[in-house]
Image: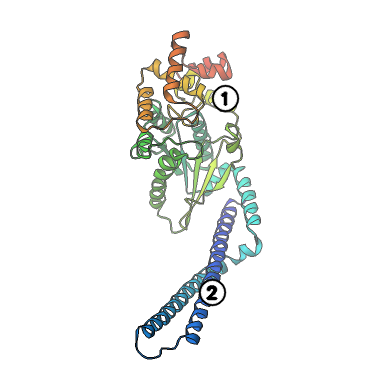
Amino acid sequence: MNVDNALRTIELIRCASKAATAYRKAQRAVREADADHSAALAQLSHWNDHIRPRGGGDRACLEHGARLAAVREHREAEQKLRKAEAGLQRASATLQAHRPALNRYRTERIRRRATTVLLDRLADHPVDLIRAADLAIIQTSAGKDSVVAMHRTVAAAKAAGGLHKVRVMHCDLGSEWPGVPELARRQAERYGIPFRLVTPDGGFLGMVENRQMWPDAKRRLCTSALKRDPTGPVITSWVRELGLDRQAIVLNVMGVRGSESASRALKARLAVDNRTTSANRLVLTWNIIHKLSEQEVWEDIASNGLEYHPIYDTGLERLSCIYCVLAGPDWLILATRVCFALELPHPEIFAALERRIGHSFKQDFTLNAIIAAARMLDALDGPVTWRRGDALRRHLGPAAANQYLALTR
């Protein structure tokens, strides 16, 4: 597969879609302006036919003033129409520039389908994809999926002779388990990859304090405001450092797996990020481990001796914020008990914020209820305990765990 041609075609289709949207918008604007213009002309004709200034007096001034108002409306309508026509001309010029793609992909449905097919084929050729790219940016949480995504990206980059293109970025939200930023850095240093730590202003708790409301599944501001928005300028600076006189090809690598949730199952392995793509960069979101199962992720970790965070050994399956707004009650109770065992202050910090803003952490229960349930379980069963390698024992068995511990001693 000719990756360069495929990428150029994808960008051409994207520009064609953008031009078609601008063209339709300009057409609507012209129709609206034309209707306003016609209404103004009709109103002006009304004043010309029925109002005749008949000497001085208040009525004559009123009639004359009304006529002037109609003339002014007429002129404003003409100005609006000229502006719309200019917009239409610009859109038409853009459309003409991309006419070859539009002739081939006449409808939006066909354009989307063609892009999807090309991207899916590109995802089957990771080495060629990195060879054609200018940057491969790994967005890591330092979790199990991220470290496997990093390992596989590095393997493809080495095979392509493009390890120098790889960068690693981690967003520290200030509400994660201890040692996460340091682990993310160590994972990148293992491969000698440049690492950038992004610290959003205020972090997660600051955002909640300002909004006086917790995020939820429908309003995941912790993703958009604290991860997506702060990383955009970093990508811009890295692209600028390349000093290219053409559009840069940027791979935005994510550790997203389809088996994690129904919504993630619908995500493509490779997709155009229209939000960050511009004239100087084509950004492709690359879910490099999208097809892997959780079992396969742990097998990759074990066989390659990849360092993972000890929080997985406690029985928690995700390395997220200590209190994740997407987690269920069982997960939150276990996280609270782990905090107790580690003597972390987070349960009271989060609960105090919940009381202060007067908004429940979850719609169905409060953090105070979660903390009370965790204390009750600790009283009944004793504090939670774990050993290094318990995550591997749970997923792969004792033999695999022992082999991993010997490998990483």
Q: Tell me the kind of residue under disc 2.
A: Asp
Asked if labels 1 and 2 touch by Cβ distance under 8 angstroms, the answer is no
Give the quarter of the image for residue 200.
top left
Instruction: Label 2, secondary structure: give it.
Output: helix
**Is residue 348 placed above or below 204 in the rendered structure?**
above
191 vs 230, nearest the viewer? 230
**In the image, residue 114 lies at what x, y percent?**
64, 53
Q: Earlier in the sequence, mark 2 or mark 1?
A: 2
**Is residue 109 placed above or below 375 in the rendered structure?**
below
Q: Counting other residues with Cα less than 10 Å from the Cα at mark 2, is it few (<14), some (14-19), or many (20 or more)?
A: some
**Residue displayed at 38% across by 25% down:** 351
Q: Counting other residues with Cα less than 10 Å from the Cα at mark 1, is it few (<14), some (14-19), or many (20 or more)?
A: some
Q: Tell me the kind of residue under disc 1.
A: Glu
**Residue displayed at 42% across by 33% down:** 188
Q: CA distance from mark 2 to mark 1?
A: 65 Å
Residue 299, numbered circle: 1
**In the image, residue 219 lies at what x, y percent?**
48, 40
Q: Is residue 61 left or right of residue 11?
A: left
**Is residue 238 placed above or below 384 in the rendered structure?**
below
203 vs 211, nearest the viewer? 211
**In the image, residue 113 lies at what x, y percent?**
65, 52
**Is residue 82 placed above or below 312 in the rendered structure?**
below
Q: Circle 2 is placed at which residue position?
A: 34
**In the image, residue 179 lies at what x, y percent?**
38, 26
Color style of the picture: rainbow
